[in-house]
Image (tube, grey):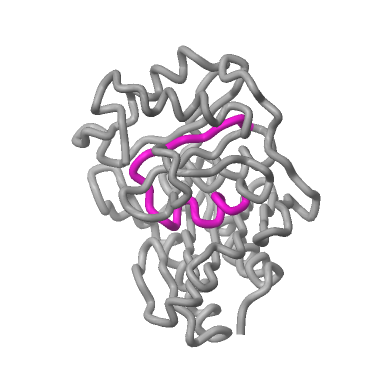
Amino acid sequence: MQPTIQVLEELAREAGKILRAGYEQEHEIRYKGVIDLVTEVDHQSEAYLIDEIRKRYPGHKILAEESGVTSGSQDSVWIIDPLDGTVNYAHQIPIFTVSIGYSAMGRMSLGVVYDPMRDELYGAERNAGSFMNGKRIHSSEAIDLKKSLLVTGFPYDAWDTEYDNFGNYVRFAKQSQGVRRLGSAALDCCYVAAGRFDGFWELQLNPWDVAAGGLIAEESGAKVTNVRGKADYLSAPQSIIACAPGIYEQMLKVLNTPVDEKAQGG
């Protein structure tokens, strides 16, 4: 049995209640890396999602940020991030989401991203468009990079990787209207889908970061690939561009013009 978009929406809203209830509370913070942290709320949200998925779809595989892989059919795979934007959450910055994607037969078919602080629920079903709170959304009609507002993110090991993205940030900042950094890749994709941002790029991601958001951006009309122009943005070495079709080639050119090898990814 396959889930419906309504099931993903229900799960995302319930997980969002967990995040909202824990917001502005003191947290048990553990570090997975020097600046890569996790809270008890990440685990509470993920435990809820995994438990519900296993009860409803016991044969399905689950890939989750904190728990890793829960075995199941490779033809039915859930890709979940129980709290995308944990650093923001821990610092009481209200920019974070629940992200739930579902892949059928090796292809993303459903995606939902929920922002509990704004009560904005983004969702998409393959070949059926993208929506926010039930209203159809579309990527922007930008055609000039210089007049475009962009968003990006940086890896947790930015001080110790050759793919730190800083060079790209500088180049895009000088060739666009501006570059923002929100701290949630899932929300970045959704804001591109809604036309709030004209383009998003990031290097060194994980599938749960953009599985749902990438589909939502695609279904809104945005062009979504990895930074080398390949359609697969979920396989290693992972990277993503999600942008208005009118600026895609311009962004791709910036990302693939050799200036500093440390600025390039994937």
* Residue 49 is covered by the magenta coloring: no
User: How many marks on residues?
Assistant: 0
The quarter in which the C terminus is drawn is: top left
* Residue 214 is covered by the magenta coloring: yes
Along the horizontal axis of the image, is 147 left or right of 264?
A: right
Seen from this angle, which residue lies furthest top? 174
Image coords of residue 44 (percent x, y): 46, 67
Along the horizontal axis of the image, is 142 left or right of 95?
A: right
Image point (42%, 23%), residue name: 254
Look at the image and give the residue range highlighted in magenta. Answer: 197-216
Image coords of residue 122 (percent x, y): 67, 52
The quarter in which the N terminus is drawn is: bottom right
Image point (50%, 42%), residue name: 92
Along the horizontal axis of the image, is 246 left or right of 200?
A: right
Image coords of residue 18 (percent x, y): 56, 63
Residue placed most toward the observer, 246 or 20: 246
Seen from this angle, which residue lies furthest left? 160
Task: Name above or below for residue 115 compared with residue 171.
Answer: below
Residue placed most toward the observer, 101 or 76: 76
Image point (38%, 53%), residue name: 206
Image point (60%, 21%), residue name: 148
- Res 197 → quadrant: top right
Residue placed most toward the observer, 90 or 264: 264
- Res 19 → quadrant: bottom right
